[in-house]
Amino acid sequence: MLIETKNLAHVYMPGTPFQVEALQGVSLEIERGEFVGIIGETGSGKSTFVQHLNGLLKPTSGEVLFDGHNIWTKANNMRKHRSRIALLFQFPEHQLFEETVFKDIAFGPRNLGLGGEELEKRVRYGLELMGLDFKLYKDRSPFNLSGGEKRRVAMAGILAMEPEVIILDEPTAGMDPSGRRQLLEQIKRLHSEQNLTVILVTHNMEDVSRLAGRLFVFSGGRLVLEGTPVDVFKSAETIKEIGLELPPLTELLQELKKSGKDISTDLFSVEDVGREILQLYREG
């Protein structure tokens, strides 16, 4: 098992009047090469959870294991661990700070001790994975790029470190529909072509239902549901009780099913749903 948490708990400001139990006994497993989604209402604990996976937060109790080893043992090299599990926060373009795109993307690999040809190779690798031409972008100022380009450069900086896992916390927040679609398609392609383990934290039920193979649903600091998108969204009442909405297409299919129509409810793309409804229409 690549990632495992055992009874993970985290308390902010313990012993004060402002104490908050952000995570309570979370145990889950993520296999190498999976694409998983983490969903939950604001304040559910999902962002706190993923910050434990690469060691940004230390558990109040419980364990975080990577490749079977507790990441908080003295024997673990935390810098190396964080290069293996990369975390991209919301609005990552705000983390750009160097004078050129090359220097910004090179920052992480350089901190790993890389230089010369290997450093340039890593920068080129990150840019090309994000669909950006190395020669065209390397000497440009990141502050003169469009919003979508800035976000892709920030992603390139993560990928240049050649992580085994990428954690994306609301990666499309604030993006226009076209930019959002392009970024998600690139993430999907990276997962399939590079065998990356991807953990997507999002409020967007439509996106996560199309992309993720498994979902973890958080509420009140607890893991309340897990399974395939089909299995999770069958628990419609639970999903709505914790303040989330079903993907619009799923809700449409479930309503048609309730009305007596012989229709599949485990479809998540517009194309598949359109074909299913057209077939239903043809059959009268």
Image (cartoon, helix red, strand yellow):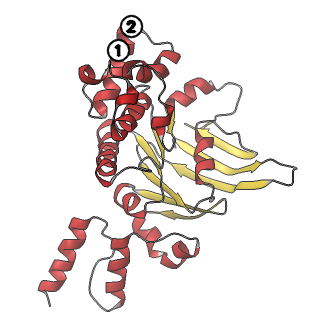
The correct choice, above or below, for 141 with respect to 180 in the image is above
Q: Verify CB contact (< 8 Å) between mark 1 and mark 2.
A: yes
Q: Residue 245: percent from the left, percent from the top?
A: 47, 71
Q: Residue 260: percent from the left, percent from the top?
A: 31, 92
Residue 112 seen in the figure: no
The residue drawn where x is 56% and y is 30% is: 82
* Quarter-of-image position of residue 103: top left
Q: Residue 243: percent from the left, percent from the top?
A: 56, 71
Residue 247 seen in the figure: yes
Q: Residue 169: percent from the left, percent from the top?
A: 50, 47
The correct choice, above or below, for 284 with respect to 209 in the image is below
Q: Is disc 2 surrounded by few (<14), some (14 to 19) or many (20+) residues within 10 Å?
A: few
**Circle 1 is placed at which residue position?**
120
**Circle 2 is placed at which residue position?**
116
Q: Amino acid at mark 1?
A: Glu
Say the numbered circle drawn on residue 216: none
Residue positioned most to the top: 116
Q: Is residue 59 left or right of residue 45?
A: right
- 113 or 178: which is nearer to us? 178
Compute the Cα span from label 1 to label 2. Answer: 7 Å
Residue positioned most to the front: 144
The residue drawn where x is 32% and y is 20% is: 138
